[in-house]
Image (cartoon, helix red, strand yellow):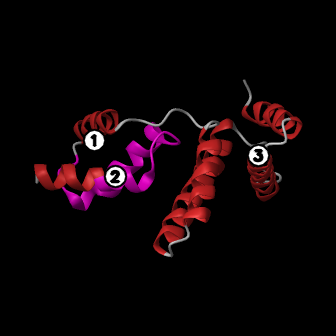
Amino acid sequence: MDILKKINEDLITSMKSKDELKTTTLRMIKSAVKNAEIAKRGKGDLTEDDIMGVLSTMVKQRKESAEQYEKANRKDLADKENTEISIIQEYLPKQLTTEELDAIIKSTIQETGVAGMKEIGKLMKELMPKVKGKADGKLVNQMIKEILEKAG
């Protein structure tokens, strides 16, 4: 099913059930997607991948905000951010487990023949399309460094 169609249906449902946080979050998603459409004006419609990118960015922003709120001892705001993350993630593909991600990274290292840290850019270029929307870029980068340091 089309992501935007599902978001619209869920928005209507959340409005009827008076779930304010979900309604607000879904409206934020629609707004972010609309802004991405405006930014891409004249270059074609947004693809599902473009929408996944918008959603991934929203999750990343909320994770960073939640961390800042936790450091400032604002658990109430951190909890709100974490709830928004779980709502947004409903529209993203299932996240890869650490083991699955590890296997993908190792197979990509073998495919590309990357030997060390100097070639990390080459590896990321091949790897990111495989895990886009399914894994956090920061985690991917961290795991690559750990694997390459062990190998090197």
Q: CA distance from mark 1 to mark 3?
A: 40 Å
The circle on residue 29 is none
* Name of the residue lying farthest toward the bottom: 72
* Name of the residue lying farthest toward the top: 1
Residue located 51% across and 76% down the image? 72
Residue located 74% across and 28% down the image? 2
Earlier-in-chain disc, 2 versus 1: 1
Q: CA distance from mark 2 to mark 1?
A: 8 Å
Which residue bears the numbered disc 1?
Answer: 112
Which residue bears the numbered disc 3?
Answer: 26
Quarter of the image where the C terminus is located: bottom left
Q: For the residue marked with disc 1, what is the amino acid?
A: Thr
- Label 1: few (<14), some (14–19) or many (≥20) C-alpha neighbours in 10 Å: few
Q: For the residue marked with disc 2, what is the amino acid?
A: Lys
Quarter of the image where the N terminus is located: top right
Residue located 65% across and 43% down the image? 87
The answer to whether residue 100 is left or right of residue 118 is right
Say if the magenta span includes residue 9.
Answer: no
Which residue bears the numbered disc 2?
Answer: 122
Residue located 56% across and 62% down the image? 78
Q: Position of residue 33 (x, y in %)?
A: 76, 49
Q: Is residue 62 above or below residue 48?
A: below
